[in-house]
Image: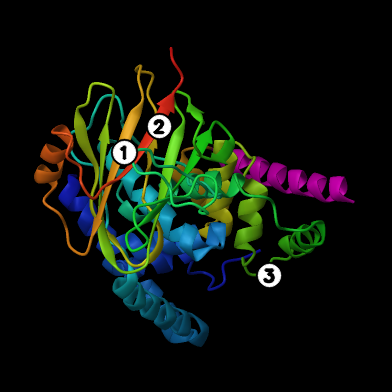
Amino acid sequence: MDTVDLHVWYERYGEAVFRRCLRIVGDEALAMDLLQETFLRAHKYRASFKGASALSWLLTIADRTSLTALGARPRVSSAEEVERFLETEADPKEPFTQHRLVAELLTRADERTRAIVMHRYFDELELEDIARRLDVNERTVRRKLEQFLADSRRFVERRA
Amino acid sequence: MKARFHPVTDLDVERYLVGELSGDEAARVEAAARASEVLQRHLDERRAAKRAFALKRPPLRLPAATRPAWWPWALALPVAAAALVAVVRRAPVEGDGPGIARRGAEVAEVEIAVQREEAVFPWRAGVILEPKDRLRLTVKTAAPSVATLIGEDARREPVILYEAVALPGGALTLPGSLEVDDTPGGERLYLFVGPTAPDAPALLKAVRAGRADGALVITLEKRRP
């Protein structure tokens, strides 16, 4: 892949990457900036791309870049919002919608947890698929998700 | 929780829209859309969003192939706060406030945010930069214009850091950031703003010759090793 390819990718995948950044940070101007950051990183690490899906690779970079940016901002979600999220999370009929909140809860999580939670709540993948993509076993995926929710509960308790 | 368009996932939808799915996978999404008005509406909205984005997306700015050793591009963490700046050769207009630099009211105003590890703070006169500090520049212009930024280290060797960046008018934070290295001596930035893209080699030549007329000049101090 060379620079010309990245420009082509920008036209083809730019909007999807922008949307991802926007769902994470909730700020259009910042998301546009993060879109550029994502492609700059892609340019820097382009030699490492070996996957079948350029979009998935770019979204992974966008996640890292955006979560770092979000972590530098003051937390805006309230304990009540997190509490509501935790209540609905257990309901198998509830659709994934609380993206900004999930991202905020993720900013202090480790790299592996971030990847798993992003695949689950943003990409909407099943646990089995996440495990396959990240080359870990399904039990690890389940445990990391449970840990993420437990940490979120602790956040509510601390606020209370 | 479950996927909004179960069994089609959000990633399926996005990959479908950019043409990354195989024929079978794409057919599965299309069949699901025929069976689900909500999914069909979502696809329509996403396609409309892509069309709208194509009209407003800024040009992609990738680093030049060669870069100065002392002033490498970095992939910066975006900084939430913005703040400010200074000019050396041309004194700021009085009343601009600390850190605000202007090169003529009609031209440009520059702000610099410094990221030092987890902290972000405004650059202003007297701030001593540390190696690995990251600087992020925001350029404000009254009208659409084009900016080129040239950096010059203590050895007085200028290099282009940003070339012909389109400024829409208003504030634009330049993509990426600049990382301060540990070489001794201060750094100098020359910002050229005009209605059209300037001749970059000519600007380099002018800076090298000490004739950067019309540039906003920002001098940065670094900690002595």
Tell me whether the residue at label 2 lies in contact with that at label 1, contact meaning CB atoms closer than 8 angstroms.
Answer: yes
Counting from the top left corner in percent of width and height, residue B54 is at 30, 72
Residue at 57% across, 40% down = B121
Asked if the stretch drawn in magenta spans residue A139, the answer is yes
Residue to which mark 3 is pinned: A94
Marks 2 and 1, Cα distance to the nearest angstrom? 8 Å
**Which residues make up the magenta segment?**
A137-160
SS type, badge 2: strand
Residue to which mark 1 is pinned: B189
Mark 1 vs mark 3: give the one in front.
1
**Residue B40, numbered label:** none
Disc 1 crowd, CA 10 A, few/some/many (<14, 14-19, 20+)? many
Both on one chain, marks 2 and 3? no
Residue at 51% across, 69% down = B7
Counting from the top left corner in percent of width and height, residue A114 is at 57, 44
Is the magenta region chiefly helix, strand or loop?
Answer: helix
SS type, badge 3: loop
